[in-house]
Each structure stands twice: as C-alpha cells, then as structure tokens.
Amino acid sequence: MLVRAVTAEDYAGWAPLWAGYNAFYERVGPSAVPEATTLVTWSRFLDPAEPMHALVAEQDGRLVGLVHYLFHRSTNMVAPNCYLADLFTLPETRGQGVGRGLIQAVYARAKQAGAFRVYWQTHESNTTAQALYNKLAERSGFIIYRHAL
C-alpha cells in the first residue's frame, strides 16, 4: 500500500471515496454535501496556499482510502494543531492497515510541519473505527457542541 498526496489526476478515484464517506455519515438527501462544495474542497487540496490537505491510500493502482487534514492556530500554544477532518477506507479493505497507514501518514506530515498534536472526532456509534483509534491516540474527554448558522 502506498499513501501519498492527491494529485489533480486522482479526482475520479477520490470522488467515490468521498461519496462513500458522506454516505457513511448520512450526508445524503437534504443533508448532502453540494457538488459545488465538493469541487471547492477538491481545489483546496491542490492549492499550496491552503492549509487543507488530502492523502490517499493506493493498492494495486486503485485508490482505497482517503484522509483530509488541516492545520490551524490555537490560543494555548504557539505550534499549530493538525485536525484530521475526514478518514474513509473502502469497506472491503478495512482491517488491512489502510486506516492506520493514513493516520500515521498524517502524524508524519504534522510532525514535519511542527504541529503540536493531531486530533479528530468520530461519531459515538462508530465503534469499529474507535477500536483502531484507541490504539493510535488517547480520547480527550471533550464533548463537541455545534450550532448551525
């Protein structure tokens, strides 16, 4: 398995993974991510001036996983934080180290960028992913609140 940054040529392989991620989190129907948002997001990954990044996992010439992450400042430290925003692997590749490889690749890039930490969130019902996450990171104990505007 190869984990690498996306290139412009990866859109056709990335888009089904992105759709799978959105379907997993029930971002369909009225909650669907608009196509325009997907296209802007994709363009951000390819813009070196953007703090948003995407990596893909490739096996036998086929994309089998994705991870999106971004860097941001914090009020309680000088070094940036790295937020792992999205992680998805094809169902048939789960348990084969794809997710682990993607997370570890984010760790490496965050360390190279001088980040203080990598953090992410998952839904409380995503117990399969939590089994992996519990091996790779510690739970912070924080509860997330949000308010749509």
Image: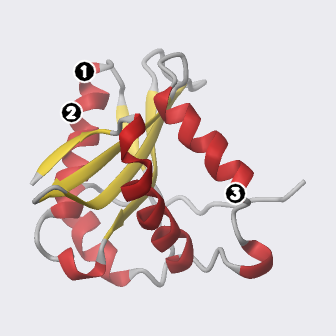
Say what secondary structure mark 1 lies in. Answer: helix
Identify the residue position indicated by label 2 in the image. Answer: 108
Circle number at residue 112 = 1
Say what secondary structure mark 2 lies in. Answer: helix
Q: Residue 84's x, y, as percent? A: 43, 47
Gap in angstroms between the C-alphas marked 1 and 3: 33 Å
For the point 70% across and 57% down, the residue is 35
Q: Is residue 148 left or right of residue 20?
A: right
Q: Is residue 84 left or right of residue 110?
A: right
Circle number at residue 46 = none
Q: Amino acid at mark 2?
A: Ala
Q: With respect to residue 35, does 29 lie above or below?
A: below
**Where on the picture, by quarter, is residue 128?**
bottom left
User: Is residue 20 visible in this depiction of the protein?
Assistant: yes
For the point 22% across and 53% down, the residue is 57
User: Is residue 54 visible in this depiction of the protein?
Assistant: no
Q: Quadrant of the N terminus?
A: bottom left
Q: With respect to residue 24, does 70 lie above or below?
A: above
Q: Is residue 125 left or right of residue 30?
A: left
Given residues 23 and 120, the one toward you in this image is 23
Q: Amino acid at mark 3?
A: Glu
Gap in angstroms between the C-alphas marked 1 and 2: 6 Å
Q: With respect to residue 88, does 125 lie above or below?
A: below
Disc 1 and disc 2 in contact, CB within 8 angstroms? yes
Q: Nearer the viewer, mark 3 or mark 2?
A: 3
Identify the residue position indicated by label 3 in the image. Answer: 35
Of mark 3 and mark 2, the one earlier in the sequence is 3
Q: Amino acid at mark 1?
A: Gln
